[in-house]
Image (tube, grey):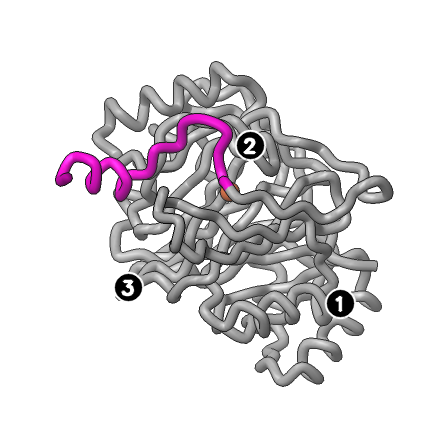
Amino acid sequence: MGVKALGYVIVETEKPAEWDDFMTKVVGVMRGENAPAGSAFYRVDDRPFRFWIREGSRDYFIAAAYEVGSAEELAALRGKVEAAGRPVEDGTAEEAVQRGVAAFFRTSDPDGNGLEFFHGDTRDDVEFVSPAGVSGFITGDMGMGHAVFCAPNFTATHDFYKDVVGFGDTDFPRFHFTDDPNDPGMGFAFMHADNGRHHSIALAEMPIPPSGCVHLMLEMKTMADVGKCNDRMKAAGIPESATLGRHVNDRTFGFYMQTPTGFDMEIGYDPLVIDWQNWETTAHTQPSEWGHEWAWQKALAEAG
Ligand SMILES: [Fe+2]
C-alpha cells in the first residue's frame, strides 16, 4: 500500500541536442517514439519512455514520477498530499495518455522538488536495443532507478516522504566528506518503495541546486556495461562528477557524470536487493567503500 517504484522523469532543457547525444551516445539509451512536439522520449526498457526531455527556456529537473498500485491508492495518496498542505494538480486525460499512464497528479515536496504520482503504467513490445551496445538496464518491479533531491528543510521533507507518501527509511546517515573532526557532516535520507531497491528516492540536506536535482541513477546489467559507459563519457568529454567506486550502503559499483542540465547521472551495477521483512535502518558515516573521488574533492586536492 505504498509507492511501487520510480516510473519516469521529466526534464526541461535549453540543450536538447546535447541531451540527445548524451543519452544515445554516452548513456546508451534508445530514442522513444511519439514524443510531443518540442520534446524527446528516451527508453531504457519496455516502457515507452523513462526520460521525457522537453526543450524550454531553462535547464531544470521538472519531476520524478512514482507509481502506486491502483486508482484507489492514487486517490488516497492525493487526499493525504492535499491534507499535508502541498499543492495538487490533476493531470488531464490527454496528459495521462502522453505519459502512458491511466491517471496522475502533480505535486511537490515541502522543499518544492517536483513530483508526479500515477497508476496504470504501460509496457509495449518494442525491443530495447541500445545504440551504444549496452546489454541492458535493470528495471522491472524495481523501477527505472532512483532520484536524489536536495532538502534544505530536511526534517519536514523527510517526514513528507515517510508519513505522507509512504516511503520507508533504509539508511539515515550523516556523511563526512572531509577529515576535519569538527565537520558536522551532511544529513542524508535513503528511502525505499515497495520493491527490493535500496532506495528509490534519497534526500540530501543542502540548498536546492540550480538544476533542481542531485542525481538520477540507472542500473546496468554488467560491470563491463558500466566500464564501457565510463570510457564513452571520457571520449565524449563529458565531465566526470565522481570516479568509479563502490557505495557502502547500497553496495552499488559505478560512477557519476554530469548531464547537460547540470545534475548528475549515476551509472551503477550490482546493488543490494533487499527483503524489507529483515531490514533495520542503517546509519553509515561514509558514502563509499572505495573510489568515488568527487570532482570538487579533486579540484581541492589540485589547488592545495
Ligand atoms: Fe545514487
Does residue 37 appear in this view?
no
Callout 3, which amino acid?
Arg
Does the numbered disc 3 mark a residue whose Cβ is under 8 Å from ligand 1? no
Q: Nearer the viewer, mark 3 or mark 2?
A: 2
Residue 8 percent coordinates (x, y): 56, 50
Direction front: furthest residue: 181
Q: Nearer the viewer, mark 2 or mark 1?
A: 2
Q: Which mark is residue 219?
A: 2
Provide the residue designation for mark 1: 74
Q: Which residues are magenta?
A: 286-304
Q: Nearer the viewer, residue 124 or 159?
A: 159
The first of marks 2 and 1 along the sequence is: 1
Residue 206 percent coordinates (x, y): 41, 62
Whether 265 is drawn above or below 130: the answer is below
What residue do we see at 58% from left, 22% from top?
221
The first of marks 3 and 2 along the sequence is: 3
Q: Nearer the viewer, residue 36 or 113?
A: 113
Q: Residues within 10 Å of mark 3 (few under 14, many from 20)?
A: some
- Is residue 298 part of the magenta span, yes or no? yes
What residue do we see at 72% from left, 55% from top?
168
- Is residue 297 part of the magenta span, yes or no? yes
Provide the residue designation for mark 3: 58
